[in-house]
Each structure stands twice: as C-alpha cells, then as structure tokens.
Amino acid sequence: LVSKSFANWGKKQLENKLSNASNEHGVGEVLVNVAEDRFVSDLIHVLSKKIEQRTAQFDATLLSRLVEILKDRDLLKKSSKGYEAAKLALDLEETTLSCLELEMKDFETFEVEELDTVLLQLKEEDKSEMIQQVQEQRDRVASAEKKLRKHPFSSIANVTSEIINDGTADGAKLLSSLRFISGKEDSSRVDGEDFCRFAKSVVVLKRKLRKLGNANPDVDPETILRQSEELAEAEDSSWEDMIAITKVLIAYGCVVPKSGETDDLDRDIDNEVFEVTPAGIDVGMLSFENSLWCFLAMGGTWDVIGASSTFDEMKAAMSFFEDDDGGFDEYADGNEEATKLDGRTTNNENVKSKAQIEAETLVSCLRDLAPGEMAGYVSCLVTGDTGRSSTSSIDVFQRLDPGLQRCIQVLLDGTERFMDVQRQYSVDERTSNCQFDLSHCEVVTAWANGCTWSEALEISGAAPGDLTRIIGRALDALRQISALKFNPLRKKDVFSNTGFVDPFSRGIHPEVRRLCREAAIEMNRYPVKDPLPFEVNEEEIVDDLEDLEDNTEDEVGSSATESSHDTEEN
C-alpha cells in the first residue's frame, strides 16, 4: 500500500510538472510536432524492416519509394502540397456535382402542362444537356478520386493502417506512438490528411525547436515528451493485483463467488460478489507476509478448484521420464489415470484430488510432532534469515528428526503447487513471496524443549538481540495460529453422497492448534518474556501485599467459622 501510494503521488507530481511547463513556456504545440515527428521516424523504421524481410504482404518496390519520400524533407513538403491540392480539387468537383444534381432535380419537378410544343422541345433539349453535364461531372469526380488514391500519402496511410491492425509487434509499436498524438481519437486508422499534418511537423520541427530553445534555454521538449509518455504508461496496477490475489483466494477456498462459477477464472470477475469462507476468515486473522501460504503450511487449505491440474500433469510427465523402466504406452495409461486425480475429481467423485491428499498428509504429519518440533517447523515460515548464520540448510535438515523432515518435504511439494497457482494468475512477486528458511529451526526447537539461554546462543551462533527477535517471531506466530477460532464440523459441511467434508469448511486441525499453544507456553520464558512488563512503584507493591494479607485472613476466618458450625451439627 505504501509503494502504491508513493507511485500515485509521483504520478500526480509529474502531471503538475508537465502542465506547468506547457503553460509557462508554450511547449504544447511543439510537443505535438515532436510526437508526430517521432511517429514518422518509427514508421520509417518499420517499413525498412519490411523491405529487408521481403514479405509477401507488401510490394518491396512500393515500400522503398514510400520510405524515400518520408526520409526526404523536400519530397515530404512537395507531397504534402500535392495531396492538399488533390484533396481540394476533389472537394470542388464534388461540390459542383452536388449543385448540378440539385439543379437537375428542380428541373424535373417543373410543370410543363401549359407549355406549347416549341417550349416543350426546348425543355427536352435542356434536360438532355443537363444529364450530359451531370455525367461529365461525375467522371471528373471519379478522376479526382482516382488521382487522390494514387497519391503517395494515400498509399502510406493504407500500408500504415494495415500494419497497425495486423496484431504484430511492429503494429503495436506504431499504435503506441500514434496514441501520444493529440487529436487522434481513432488510433487504429490513419489517412492522407493525417500524413499531411505529420509532414508539416517534420518540416518545421527543427525551426520550432530552435526558436523555443532561444526563448527558453532550460526547456527540453524531448525530455518533456518522454516524461509524458512515462506518465501515460504509469498505470495504477493496484486493481490488477487485487484481482490476481482474489483468484488465488478462490482457488484455495478462502472466498467463494455467489454465482458459484469457479471453473473459469480467466473471465472478468470485477463485478463479482464473494462470500468469505471460514478458511478465509482464518487467513484474514493472520498477520504474516504471505498469510495464505502460512495457513496452507499448517494444513488449513488446498487447491479446491483444480487450478493446479496442469502442474500435476507436468510432474507426472517428469516423474515418468526420470524412470528408465517405463515406456510411452505405460506413460499414456498412467497419465490418463493421473488426470483423474488432478485438481477436481472428474468422473469419480469418490477420488480425492492430489492437492487434498497432500494437505491431509501434511496434517497427519503435523499431528505426530512434539510441541518443540512444532515450534521449529513454524519458525521456518516466519523468522527469516538474519544473514549472519553460516550453517547450511542441508546440514540443518539432515540433523532434524525424521518426523519433522517428513513435514518439511510434504510442505515443499504443496508450496511448489501454490507458487504455480500464483504464477498462473500473475500475482505480484512481492506479494507472492514464500520464504522458507531452516536456519533457525534447531535453536527454536531446543528453546521450546527447555534449553538454557546460553545453550540457545551456542546452537544458533547469533547475537543475543538477533536470537531474541528470532524466537520472538516464532512465538508470535505460534500464538496467532493457536488463537484461531475453532470451526466445528456441521452436518451441512459433509456431502451426503460421498461422506467427504466440504473443502470450503476447512481450517487448521484442533490438534495442530493445541500443539502450537503448548509450544508457545514453553517458549514464553526469560529472556524472551519480560518478567516485569510494566513499571510498578513500591507503594503499589506494598498496597497489593496488604490486600493479599487481608484476603488471606478473611479466608482463614471464614474457614474456621465453617468448621465450628460443622462440629456443632455433628
């Protein structure tokens, strides 16, 4: 959020800077000329590439002639004047034709019933002459149109429009340059008149830049134009990041669209309404760098919609080719069976997905851990690397107990799947970070098992301050996980036809939360725990002791009274 805020602030500052520069120095018109000149330069580059490629799409001879015109300022100027003259001639011919057709229409509606034979004959001769004039004028219009179509600017416009709309990288480049030219509402189409304007900009640009430089030595129109391009490209991607994260949350059962459509997440979900599941509520209660991944690491959820089915197919193919004894037919049969386990179940609803099997295996392994081992496992998710440890992660892993090693192996498989889903939905790399670090697993496990502070310092090799931070972060994570609300299983959460639990009702297993709670209690001791968290003055301590003595005397007196009453009753 902070980075997005500063990005928007910087964008606003750049907008103000460009606006002030345009108003104070009058560079607005020059910026238009610079943008149009840059478009012509990009077009020359693209056309030259087409000539070298000798593609069948365009005539190389024609392209060479057009590039020659675009590169020569004198030819550009001459062609611009020729196009304007041809366009003006066409407009005049069309205007004349409109007048003749209007006159012809009025002539045909004239009443001739009372005219004598001589006048009627004259009228027929005039009509015949009028029809001939209209036809001749139409021929002149067609000739003017043909001349305009054959003009080099018309050919350049047609070629440019075709390149822009062909969907290639060259077309995208021209389209991007064209969008920075003001007055071009439809950037996908250019005509001869546009190139007349572009030609004028190419011809007069150097003179305008020289005049602007003499009047304002500190102003560089090229720099201002580059900044305006950066401003146009600096789109706020916050909403795109939000949509990407939402799709991952849908895949892992944390939010559910009210429409119920979870099969196709490539569709537009901007206007979708969602419900937060119990798993989503739990993820929202955690405050880690990637809370969904930590929740997954504790067995709280899995890919419930089959978004990682392609990942399973890839792993199946890789595992097959690593096996030297297999054959292609065997792979085809095995892969067909494996696809039944990928993502959601397809034909057989009683078959669990691989993602669900991974999650249930992880929960089973976590439940077999001791509280100290659970503390070490959680520390791998949250403590991070201090950068001062020289111990190899492989060496640390080999010294761990087999049960904890098994948990880590299963987690790494689930993490690989989770990262694939995040990449599939284009989650920002800073958001999708899953930092798993074994460096401090040993010392946190030992501290939770009751080792002394000196022993912990010796095991970790870290400074006392660093070790306090490492153990404190692990302790805080254990407290967060153990404090999650218990979501009891209801009858509605079980599918009647299969007996399976609804994946949207998932949460962290109660036994896992109990282990986290016990580990947190064992770790919460000096010097991680401050024995005097608040300053208390001596007077308050004396008052508390006196109140305690009074309460003790009252309790003793009441006990003696009750004993005497019991004696009398006996």
Image (cartoon, helix red, strand yellow):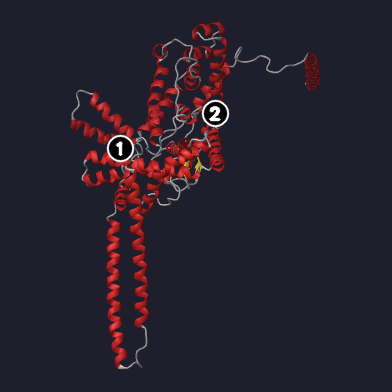
Q: Position of residue 198 (x, y in %)?
A: 39, 47
Is 26 on the left or on the right of 187, as rendered? right
Is 148 on the left or on the right of 541, as rendered? left
Task: Please determine whether, in this image, residue 368 is positioned above or below residue 339.
Answer: above
Q: Which mark is residue 116?
A: none
The N terminus - image quarter: top right
Q: Which residue is mark 1?
A: 340
Q: Position of residue 315 (x, y in %)?
A: 30, 29
| Crowd band around label 2 with a 10 angstrom C-alpha radius: few (<14), some (14–19), many (20+) | few
Amino acid type of the residue that numbered disc 1 sits on in the rendered structure: Lys
Task: Please determine whether, in this image, residue 145 is positioned above or below residue 173.
Answer: below
Q: Circle 1 sits in a helix, a strand or a loop, which is it?
A: loop
Q: Position of residue 477 (x, y in %)?
A: 54, 23
Instruction: Give the residue drawn at x 27%, y 27%.
Output: 318
Splitting the image into 4 quarters, where does residue 553 fall?
top right
Task: Please determine whether, in this image, residue 74 is positioned above or below residue 528.
Answer: below
Residue 263 visible in the picture: no
Q: Nearer the viewer, mark 1 or mark 2?
A: 2
Going from the N terminus, do you reach mark 1 or mark 2 first? 2
Is 309 on the left or on the right of 385, as rendered? left
Is 421 on the left or on the right of 124, as rendered? right
Residue 10 visible in the picture: yes
Q: Position of residue 555 (x, y in %)?
A: 78, 19
Give the spatial CA distance, label 1 vs label 2: 36 Å
Residue 115 vs residue 287, the one in the foreground: 115
